[in-house]
Structures are given as structure tokens and as C-alpha cells.
Amino acid sequence: MKLVALILFVVMYIMIIQFQNYKEHIALGTGFVYILLGILPFNRILASIDINVFLMLIGTMIVVYYFIESKMPALIADKLLDISPNVMWVTIFMSAFAGLISAFIDNTATVLMIAPIGIAVCKKLKINPIPMILCLAISSNLQGAATLVGDTTSIMLGAHANMDFNSFFFINGKPSIFFAVELGALASLAVMMFMFRNYRKKVEASKDVRVINYYSSILLILLIVSLIVASFFPIRPSYTNGIICIGFALLCLLVDGTRNKRDNAILQSIRNVDYKTVLLLLGLFLVIGGITEVGLINDISDFIAKIGGNHPFILYTIIVWGSAFISAFIDNIPYVATMLPVVKSICAVSSINPYLLYFGLLSGATLGGNVTPVGASANIAGVSLLKKEGYDVSFKEFMKYGIPLTFSALFVGYIFIWFVWK
């Protein structure tokens, strides 16, 4: 049974790489096959599914939808143009803003709302928009690991390692992954300044952005504050964060329904939920549950531990740079879903601090996706927007920006995490 589970698992990964548009169907299908073959017993199905992750994902997606629709991000971006003396600083400020937003909002959504502003600026100045938009996408993806709600992989780590919102800032009195990500972001911005040092054309703001409502911005802030407050309660249900996120989503729907009296607006916000990601996670939870049941997770962890010789630095290095390489070519969600229990198993049989490997996994998997245009959904969104404007981005051109920005950010985070958590 273990061999069958392994073969199906490998085939699933190959098919996900080959058929990106059908990855949720492939994962779900593999999960159902596991159930039918008895690899994942019926009585272990619910135990394999983390409901808290789904509640957090769906809740934040709905709140973020209203925030984007309010035009508040566009107004903030317009204000950034006001203080930017030239194109280089527009790129720096817009990339930093995209990164900041992505620490709390889905990376792809960030690119979809910020990149059109960058494209408009480039059109006005009659310059090639490719460099600016690629930097926006890369910065957006880079910051996803900074907070609990910044990315799907962060939500998954939080649920798996029992980390709350504050845990991404400090754990056991030590600075957490937020600071590693931010130091990496500063390093990438420094590289960006060098890359764009000759972009000195002056810019002006459009002055025509109008915020539709302010309640969505207030609710988003209250959502974040509520997650922070909940972190101070040591004894709380495991699904607390999910309840908070879905609660604010319902509040957004209620306020929208009361203010606008339009059912189609509420339906549109519900339709806007990324159900593909939700279904992908459901399938992956079933698959990971199955390979855990038959002992494959332990086998994988034993193999990695053997390569690393149970030496913390070697294992940490393998996890970070191996994750970065793999995530450059495949979606980091299935990869992180697979590796979280592997890391837990490695730490269970050794004296290695689990946070060292958890943070190494998250940083490597998140930042590695910046190397290629297919490594992250944010990159795909940015390249798609450029293609609509008539600009085709090749692998080589993307990597010209992706490699130096990724390496600088990942290397700084890699050093920081090791010295803090070794």
C-alpha cells in the first residue's frame, strides 16, 4: 500500500506541474483515490482536514474583496506618486507598498490592484512597463510570509505549528519570521535601487481617484487587531482565528447589504473567493493525510535527516535552498503542505529547534517562487497583465529581475533565521 501511495503522490505532483490550470482537480482526484483504496481510512478523513485554514482563507478573501473595491489601495498608490520625484522612486515606493499590502492581503490580489496603476504611469511616460511590473509582483510575493494572513502558506504554517498572529513577530522572546522577511525586503529594495538607478524621468499623480467607502478599510484593520488581541489568550479554541476571519467577512456582507440593498454585490463578493485554492487545499489535506497514515512522511523525513546527518546547519540549509529551488518551478502550496509534516517529523527525532526549519521552509518556499514567472500566482498575474498590454515576458527576462532580488532577500533572511533560531 505504501508503494501505491508513493506512486500516486509522485504522479499527482507531475500532473500538477504539467497542468497548472487543473491542479485542484488533480489534487482532489488523488485524494478520492486514496480514500477508495483505503490509503486514507474513512474514519481519518475529518482529522486530515484543517477547518481553521478554510475559515481563515475564505474570511480574509471576502474582506479583502471589499477593501479593493473601495479604491482605498488606489488612493494610497496615488499619494505615493505624489511624493515620487522620478521613475526610480515610483518603482521603489510602489514595490514597497505592494509588499506592505501583501503582508496582510493575498499576493495575487495585490498585484491585480497595484500593477494597473504602474502600467498607467509607464504609458504616460512612454517607457517599458515590464521592469516595474515584475518588481511589483516579486515584492508582493516576497512579503507573503511576513504575517499569519499574508499568504496561504503562512496560514497553513500557523495552523500546523499552532502559531497565532503575534507568533510571526515574536516567539519565546525571540524575533520571528516577520523580521527575516522585512530585512530581506530591504535588501531587495537596495538591489532594486541599483537596477533602476538610471530611471530619472519625472512623474505626476492622476488626481482622479475617489474612495467609494471607508467601512471596508476599518473592518480590515479591526480584523488584524482582533487577530492580535486573540494572540494574547493562551487558552483558546484551535479555530479561533478562522472564526474571527469569517466573522468579519459576514460583517462586511451585512454592512454592504444594509448600505447598498443590492443582492448582486453580495453575490459578487462571494463569487470572488478563490475556490480553486480552497479545493486544492482540500485535496492536498486528503493526500497528506493518506501518506501520513501509511508512513511515507516518516520515510521522507528520515531520508532528509540522513542526508543532513542530523546536523542542524546542514538540514536548515537543505530545507531553505532546496525549497527555493523547487518552488521556482512548482506551486508552493502543495510543496509546503507536503513538507510541514516532514519538518515536524525531523524535529521530533532530533534536538533541532522546530522554528528554525519551519521558518526556513516558509522563507525558501515563498521567496523561491520569485525566480521564474510560473513560480507564484502573483508572478503569473503580473505577466498576464503585461501580455494584455502587448508585452510578452520570457523566462530569461523575468529571471533577470527575479534571481538578484530573490537571492538578496533570501540570503539575508537565511542568515538572520540561523543566528536567531539555531
Image (tube, grey):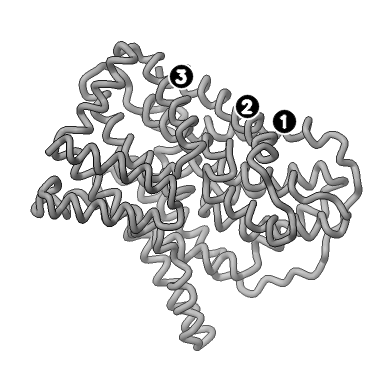
Label 3 secondary element: helix
> What's under tag 3, amino acid-wise?
Trp
Q: Which SS class for mark 2?
A: helix
Could you say where residue 359 lies in the image, as x and y percent from the top left? 42, 31
Q: Position of residue 76 (x, y in %)?
A: 70, 58
Labelled disc at residue 418 = 3
Residue at x-position 10% and y-position 54%: 42
| Residue holding disc 1 | 190
Q: Answer with left or right where residue 216 lies relative to residue 240.
A: right
Vertical relation: 157 (above or below) 20: above
Q: Quadrant of residue 254?
A: bottom left
416, above or below 103, in the image = above
Q: Is residue 410 left or right of residue 227?
A: right
Which residue is at the front of the view, 345 or 382? Answer: 382
Q: Earlier in the sequence, mark 3 or mark 2?
A: 2
Residue 154 place in picture, x, y as percent = 42, 43
C-alpha separation, residue under disc 3 versus residue under disc 2: 16 Å
Quarter assignment of residue 216: bottom right
The amino acid type of the residue labelled 1 equals Ala
Query: Viewer-nearest of labels 1 and 2?
Result: 2
Would you say 179 lies left or right of 398 here?
A: left
Badge 1 vs badge 2, beta-carbon distance below 8 Å: yes
Type of the residue with mark 2: Ser
Quadrant housing the C terminus: top left
**Can residue 52 be seen by looking at this rendering?**
no
- The local crowd at label 2, few if under 14, some if 14 to 19, many if 20 or more residues have their Cα within 10 Å, is many
Give the residue displayed 62% in from the left and 35% down from the top. 185
- Which residue is labeled 2 in the image? 408
